[in-house]
Image (cartoon, rainbow, N blue to C red):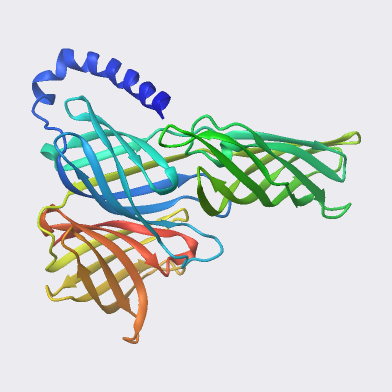
Amino acid sequence: MNRTRNHFMRGWLRLASLAALCLWPLAAQTPPPAGAYGILLNFYEMDQAGWTGGAGIGVLNIDEAGHVTGTFRFQGRDSVDASRTVETGSFTGTYTVVYYGVGLLELTFPEGFQLVFAVVTTDGGKTLQFTSYATGAGNVALRGSPQSLTGTLPAALLFKELRDVTGGISLTVQRAAPSAIVFTGGGKEASGTATCPDGSTGKWTASVENLTIAALTGGNNGPAEGNFLLSANGKVCGGEFDWRTLSGLVTGSFAPTGNVLVLRNYGSIVRGTARAIGSASLAGTYGLQSDFWPYPGGFLANMTFDGAGGIFGTFIAGNANGEFSTGDRTGKYVIQDDGSGTIEFNTPTGEPGGPSYSIVVVDDGAGFLFLRTKANPQTSVSFGYARLQ
């Protein structure tokens, strides 16, 4: 974490020294962020299957000394269960001013997961725009006979949130059939050390439950390409995780003397925005735009909040016939004192059990951020921003 922070600081300080020559009179007018903000994050993770990123929503509190606290809800994209339970929790961290209007936000989540953001402040401190650094793609080479492949998965690919991860996991996969370029299998349990979020040295253990490689080739002697999906479970720094996946592209070749395949795991980046909360109440009609990730899609809506917990919405979306369709929904909403809340829509027939959303009120009630947490469409994640009409 310290290496990452120092890398960011050096880069931003070089930019700041140049900007100071010509932008000081304007940039000096931008105060550092302070107060309560609604935050919406999009996790872009370029996988082929399984968890391919997701979105998170929450409340971010920054005091004048740069101490950060907050709560969040995260909805990961799941190709198996589109209604997978949303994860909830809290985070702590720090905000460091690098230059007027520019800063560094470091957040620590449960189980030691950490994110570092470069931040630009706009709207007189009422809006934050931020991005994480991009993680690079990791490669794992598997070698073997025409019927089996073996290799070692570096543990650092699985525990991307930790520093100084040592060790790896042995992988072995068998060809499904002589005529098929599909390999399946797993690996034995392995362990190693890593630097935990508190700076102490901790231990990780993990086992690969399944590794499936589907490669395409013009023949047993030709080049190979395709996709892979790997799932694992284990413990790290005293905490457990249910399961994690890696997925990406396969490249390599098949030869009479054996196979050589390289698993290329994609990188990831987290981007988002935060807006000052102010008054935590909703009343009136709001225009809403929802985006889907990773599959293209979305819808528009008018949502009317009656100020007493009742909501009526009209949705507008495109369909497969190249036309727009509309539909009405009723429901209820709840807003907490910190600006966070939920929306529970009814089914088209008026019964409970329709789509659900986590929301955060921003701009003194003039808008809200939202994340769909139930009945996400086509295994995508739906999120967006609404403004008072």
Figure quadrant of residue 177 = bottom right
Figure quadrant of residue 374 = bottom left
Is residue 370 visible in the rendered image? The answer is yes
Of residues 122 and 185, the one drawn nearer to the viewer in this rendering: 185
- Residue 255 vs 314, above or below: the answer is above
Of residues 159 and 381, the one drawn nearer to the viewer in this rendering: 159
Q: Residue at coordinates 53% horizontally, 34% vertically from top-left?
A: 194
- Residue 165 vs 320, above or below: the answer is above
Q: Residue 197: x, y in percent?
A: 42, 37
Residue 295 horizontal side relative to residue 227, left or right = left
Is residue 51 visible in the rendered image? The answer is no
Of residues 255 and 31, the one drawn nearer to the viewer in this rendering: 31
Q: Residue at coordinates 63% horizontally, 37% vertically from top-left?
A: 264
Q: Residue 108: x, y in percent?
A: 36, 41
Q: Residue at coordinates 46% horizontally, 50% vertically from top-left?
A: 53
Residue 282 horizontal side relative to residue 172, left or right = left
Residue 85 horizontal side relative to residue 40, left or right = right
